[in-house]
Image (tube, rainbow, N blue to C red):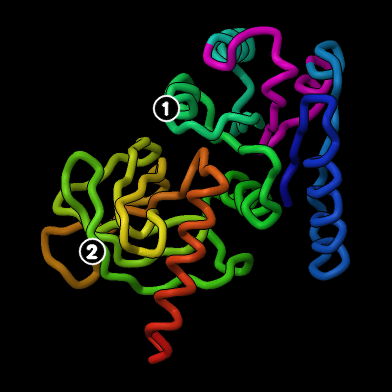
Amino acid sequence: MAAVLYFGKDDKIVKTIQQAFQSMREEYGDASTISHIQDERALEEALIAMVFDVMFFEQSFLPDTPAKWIVQFKTGHPRVKSNYILVGDYTDMGLILPILEAGWTDYVVNPPDKPLLIEKISLYSTGQRTKDRQVYSLALSQSADLAKPGHIEELSEFDCKLRTSYQVTQNELAILYSKAFGSNLTTMGSAIGRCYKSEAHPTMKDHFLNHFSFVGVTPDVLQNIRTSLRKTYVASKGGG
């Protein structure tokens, strides 16, 4: 189960999560909950009374810039250990990356993609990726670059597994460059990734398999990834 908080006036994400939690409750008996809070006093009271795994904050509802606010918030609430997700309208990676570097766990672009939204809650509340909520995950052979070269061995719409000759530090942010993120697997594209797991490669000596979840993913990049997955799947079946 997950305890989720949403701080802001817009209820679209709240309703989406409530519907998903209701379905999970009926199907699995899951007891995940979401609290919708719309003022700072109620927020302070909630943080005293409850522990939240994931907290969403509406960017337009913050009294300061996202970078300044998250630093001040964490400084004033040292006992709060949670994952902080900012919800906003930025689609420029150059604007999103500094927000993540300032201390935000992730950035969700409006309007929210429902499968991506639920996946974020699952990942950040458990620390593990699940393949229950995705179109498919495919083995891939696609070069990638994150300042040092790597190789994408598996890609899903939510994450990728990158083979490198060096180990990436857990929680490290990186901009990943690959045609897998571009349009139609023909042009170079980019995505921001956060390493949530790194392990010795199972078959290649002195190599590592680094698991990156996509953070601050924009609608166009998400669409490119899904297109890449469909084209790779069709090609693997001999249809293209």
Q: Is residue 48 magenta?
A: yes
| Mark 2–mark 1 distance (CA, rounded to whole Å) | 32 Å
81 above or below 226?
Answer: above
Is the residue marked by circle 1 packed among few (<14), some (14-19), or many (20+) residues within 10 Å? few
The image quadrant of residue 75 is: top right
The image quadrant of residue 180 is: bottom left
> Which residue bears the numbered disc 1?
94
Q: Position of residue 45 (x, y in %)?
A: 84, 17
Q: Position of residue 188 (x, y in %)?
A: 30, 51
Where does the magenta region start and end? 44-67
Q: Is residue 179 magenta?
A: no
> Which residue bears the numbered disc 2?
201
Residue 171 or residue 60, whichever sits in front: 60
Q: If you read the primary sequence from the N terminus, does the residue marked by circle 2 or circle 1 appear first?
A: 1
Q: Give the residue type that dot 2 points to.
A: His
Residue 182 or residue 35, whichever sits in front: 182
Q: Describe the element under mark 2 as helix, strand or loop.
A: loop
